[in-house]
Amino acid sequence: MFVPCDHGGGSAGPDLKGFTLLMPAVSVGNVGQLAIDLVISTLDMTKVGYFYTDCLVPMVGNNPYATAEENSVELSINAEVYSLPSKKLVVLQIRSPFIKNKYRPFCQTLLSWVKSSKCARVVLLSSSHAYQRNDEQLLGTPLRYLLTPDLEKAVGGLMQELNWKEMEKVAAYPGIDDTDKVLHIPGGGITKLLFTESCSKGIQMAVLLKFCSEGDNIPDAFALVNYLNEWLQLIKSEVNTSSQWKIPSSWRLLFGSGLPPALF
Amino acid sequence: MATFFGEVVVAPSRAGVDDEEWAEEAREETPEDREIRRELEKKREIDVLWTLKSGASTESSADQLFVCSKLVIAIGHNAAAFLSSFILDSVCWEIVGVVKLWNEWCRTSNSTNVLPTDSFCLFYRLVSDPTVLLCQCSCYVAEDQQFQWLEKVFGCMRKEGLQVTILSTCPVADYKTQESTLTLPSPFLKALKTKEFKEQVCCPLLEQPNIVRDLPAA
């Protein structure tokens, strides 16, 4: 599935042993994907390859992180991998929705690739429908985290120090209190599937998610990427962290073209 | 959208995921489910049939790869019509293949005798240079069939030295630009090219944040 680029380490591909894989879930508001765009754009990451997969709707365009004429003509497709060896960070960006019935095969192939490339851990950025929150979730921070048991051992303490809130389990049958509690991430796309598969395969995975609704999700993306930064310290966190992240050029015209003057 | 008081409308998510779909996916597949899914998959399979010199239709075999130097693919009615009007004729071009597929939007047959208003996907070869192929694909290839189409068509060709040109159309309303699309002189051409394409492109490149999707993208 993974196809390395020419400058991505040659035919053998880049060495990702011990790296942290950061990736989005295609979820409500596309918040995870927007947050990943911010990471790739700000850290000026290099593309090292892409996923050749039949699980995502095909799309292609010119370089979404272009900063000048010279670097604006590189083609970009629906699933690409970028890396920053100095921070042992590898990032997967997913740009289009899943094709029906293909979520499971994609998750399985992805997790095998994680294992075979010996990534140390996976951090999944996601979101969940704000309107499905229960009464307690309506108060306080809209950001949540989840850790697989293997990662819990390594960083569980750090999450306590950061005063982060773990994603609550909810009753399997809402309204009936004495049923089993289950993990429920409405609008989260493949988040729950990837998380439960990682738990059973012993993969160290963290999920960082934000409750949100569809609309202008740029502020949600900033909130999520700053949340991530509290832990991974990708950029220096100063007082006004929002201005530290570089918005990619492809975020222009997110809501369509200019308006016809004749409208007024 | 307008609703009456008290009506709750679930807004579609840009994530493109339906929660009910997830619940369905999450359930373990029973043998009956698997059988149904396999039948559906078979129905949606694409067949690429090549007509050999003798005129008989046959499946292309793995060891008989076409040597192809140029492949022009026209996707959609407009692009297909362009090829019919300006390039194709019955003297210089011969039909060498057809794609048979079915989906909810259209069905093509393995007949090569088609009307312009039919949905079809045909391959033509230039008589004077048999390494030049044209494909007219006026049928809609569904999301889950696009990859298959790609693999089956290109799987029949030798890819060394192959130059592929894809012709397609998109509505002007989908084009994102600073000014309003109302004032844009249309139609207009834009291009995307791989870094291996070294020749001059005849029109400006597609600016961010515009993208191409579906079969042309695949």
Image: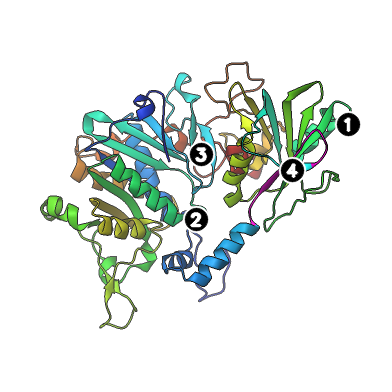
Which is in the foreground here, disc 1 or disc 3?
1
Counting other residues with Cα less than 10 Å from the Cα at mark 3, is it few (<14), some (14-19), or many (20 or more)?
A: some
First in sequence: mark 2 vs mark 4: 2
Provide the secondary structure element on which disc 3 rests: loop
Q: Is residue A196 above or below residue B210?
A: below
- Which sits earlier in the primary sequence, circle 4 or circle 1? 4
Residue under numbered circle 1: B90
Q: Residue at x 80, y 35 (%)?
A: B95
Rendered location of residue A36, percent (x, y): 35, 41
The residue indicated by pointer 2 is B16
Circle 1: element type: loop
Q: Are the numbered discs 1 and 3 placed on the same chain, yes or no?
A: no
Q: B48 left or right of A172?
A: right
- Residue B22 at x, y percent in the picture: 44, 64
Residue wearing tag 4: B58
> Which amino acid, mark 1?
Ser
- In the rendered structure, the residue with mark 3 lies on which chain? A
The lab-note entry on whether marks 4 and 3 share a chain reads no
Kind of element beneath mark 2: loop
Q: CA distance from mark 4 to mark 3?
A: 49 Å
Q: Looking at this view, is A35 or A182 the one in front? A: A182
Please name the amino acid that badge 4 sits on.
Thr
- Quadrant in which the N terminus of chain A is drawn: top left
User: Residue A114: which quarter of the image?
Assistant: top left
Residue A259 can be seen, yes or no: no
Whether discs 4 and 1 lie on one chain: the answer is yes
Q: Position of residue B41 (x, y in %)?
A: 59, 58
